[in-house]
Image (cartoon, helix red, strand yellow):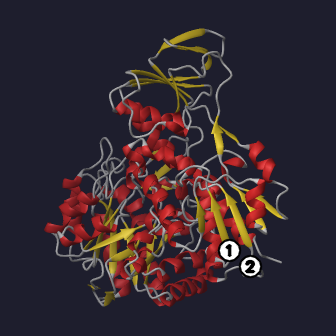
Amino acid sequence: MSFQHLFQPLKVSGLTLKNRLLSAPTSLAELGAGEHYSPANIAYYRLRAVGGTALVTVGDVIVEISTGRSHPQQVGMDDPTVTPYLVELADAIHSGGAAAGIELDHGGALCSPELIGGKNAIGPSGYVDEWGDTVEEMTQADIVRIADAFGTAAATAKDCGFDLVMIHGGHGWLLHQFISPLTNHRTDRWGGSFENRMRFPLLVIDRVRAAVGNGFPIEFRMSGSERTVGGYDIQTGIKIAAAIDGRVDLIHVSAGTQQNSYSAVLMHPGIFQQHGENSGLAAAIKPVVKTPVVTVGAFSEPELMEQFLAEGHADAIAMGRALIADPFLPKKLLHGQRDELIPCLRCGECQSSMIKNRIIRCTVNPIIGRELEYFHPIPTHLRRKVLIAGGGPAGMQAALTACARGHTVVLCEAENRLGGALKFADSADFKRNMRLYREHLIHMVRSRPIDLRLNTTVTNALVKEIAPDVIIAAVGADPLILPVPGATGETVIIGADIGADTSKIGKTVVVIGGGLIGCETALHLAREGRKVTILEMREELAADCSRMHKINLIHQLEQEPNITPAEGMRCTAITGAGVTAVDCQDGEVFFPAETVIMAAGMVARSATVEALRTLAQEYYVIGDCRRARQVMQAVREGYDTAVSIGLL
């Protein structure tokens, strides 16, 4: 496809965007010294610019840091020491060929006291939150002061070289808190009717316009629907858009609210939601406004994006996670390299790693979180011949990285196809993106000068023939078979071996193991109409999931009537009739089942690893054969190991 609609310029007030692909504002994992932007932060945004997007918007910048900071990785526009870093950030984005935007925000009632100097948070209405912290109702003086702070912040951003300011009026933050009937219970002129609830956001827009003047673009980010019980729907979303139409230059339509955890998941749709999950909100708003409309939310497939614009449902598409997975998505499309796009898995690892460890990671792109390495690559001092045993995600990533760095690469896979543990992606429809990622890796391996040998086990004789300088073991892991009677019986199927054909699986199923693979397998089988019990030793399901994916997965399990969870249960025997288990008090329970799915974990192939250890001077062990875990760790180990080869 030519993607002609994606690459049409878009004029926004006095700014011309070179295409319709925008980098949505995203949070940072961590700030630098003195709570300023670090070189790594700047490289994070610069990479999106050099990748070809028309507009890169810096996310989560607070207009009044003493009252508006909702998490630690935010800078304050009212801190004068931030200014030189903002200038450098805008310059870095411009150097990559993109326009620079900045998202102005205030956390309002969602600010924790420890982040705002121990003070109580402020919001449209007063209450005590679920953690026992008091939220104070904003006074008239508070409202005017913060509206003025938005204006001052916008003027500062303009002075620092930014081309556009985005006012954040969605996702449950302060402006959204005034708009939403869930959070605004005022009875004065700032609450009650829709017109009153919109009064504060409109005041902020007016203050920003007065500060930046006509001809300088203002974008307004809104939730087209809160997508939660009691929240407003698209009909109110249309009214919001109509109220700001003509006052701003772009209407950026997202969804959801941080006030509800599952609504926050729908804000960043995962594998159980559709591609372009929230696009219908923008499509509903577009016909009723004259202002250009931006849509956002789980857009990663170019054909869908092109069609959406071609049909007139929006004027531009903003992407967050898709550009984390592949910052060069726009340039690859522009240059006809559609088949080299790295697909986003929508797994939530990028968000979850920031929440858990304050560091960003991407399952499919190992450069994320250390973008400085892209701009300052580690040199290769010596070219080596590298033999890789195993064609799973770790082995393929190692092969691709080693090849790109100039090494001679031989990749051997014992089976007749590449993919390794990614074969589990064949079973469920919601694993489609994982299948796309597997096929992407296979395509990349086959398109590079890599000596690929399928149906080939690495043996002593083969090593002597190839004479590698380096061997990388990526031979994977085997399913853990519980040491209980009947574990190898005819009714038992290994979870990782379930393919697209599930016709031989019975109508009643017990899944032994409630981790990621077990829960997703259970969900897939239940959606096909089977009665499924999930047997898990721990007291929680999906304990090995990333935070965002776990919220999504647990919600799906809870909504599925064919699933019965059985936490805190240990399997003691399997028969042709079902599974016997005991709880923590040694109480015995029998679960009838025609089929038993074994998803109790994986065991590294240590014997194979040790057999290869002495066959080359340099030897590395990566992926599941080092320690069984998730795809992200395997991919990063493959990348890191390949980068370390040939260094002196």
Q: Specify few, some or many for label 1: CA neighbours under 10 Å numbering under 14, 14-19, or 20 or more.
A: some
Q: Is residue 507 visible?
A: yes
Q: Position of residue 398 (x, y in %)?
A: 64, 64
**Residue corresponding to mark 1:** 408
Residue 612 relative to residue 9: left or right = right
Q: Position of residue 291 (x, y in %)?
A: 21, 76
Image quadrant in which you'd find residue 289: bottom left
For image coordinates 35% across by 72% down, the residue present is 204
Quadrant location, the C terminus: bottom right
What kind of element bears circle 2? loop
Whichever of labels 1 and 2 marks the residue nearer the N terminus, that label is 2
Quadrant location, the N terminus: bottom left
Q: Position of residue 396 (x, y in %)?
A: 59, 61
Which of the pair 67/310 is nearer the observer? 310
Image mark count? 2
Q: What's under tag 1, amino acid-wise?
A: Thr
Which of the pair 441/99 is nearer the observer? 441
What kind of element bears circle 1? strand
**Residue corresponding to mark 2:** 383
Image quadrant in which you'd find residue 516: top right
Q: Is residue 37 visible?
A: no
Numbered label attached to residue 468: none
Query: What is the distance, in whole Å, between disc 1 and disc 2 at their CAs?
Result: 7 Å
Q: What's under tag 2, amino acid-wise?
A: Arg
Residue 44 relative to residue 241: left or right = right
Q: Specify few, some or many for label 2: CA neighbours under 10 Å numbering under 14, 14-19, or 20 or more.
A: some
Q: Is residue 161 above or below residue 121?
A: below
Image quadrant in which you'd find residue 616: bottom right
Q: Is residue 647 above or below residue 638?
A: below
Give yes or no for contact between labels 1 and 2 (Cβ–Cβ under 8 Å): yes
Q: Is residue 291 above or below residue 569?
A: below
Q: Position of residue 577 (x, y in %)?
A: 48, 11
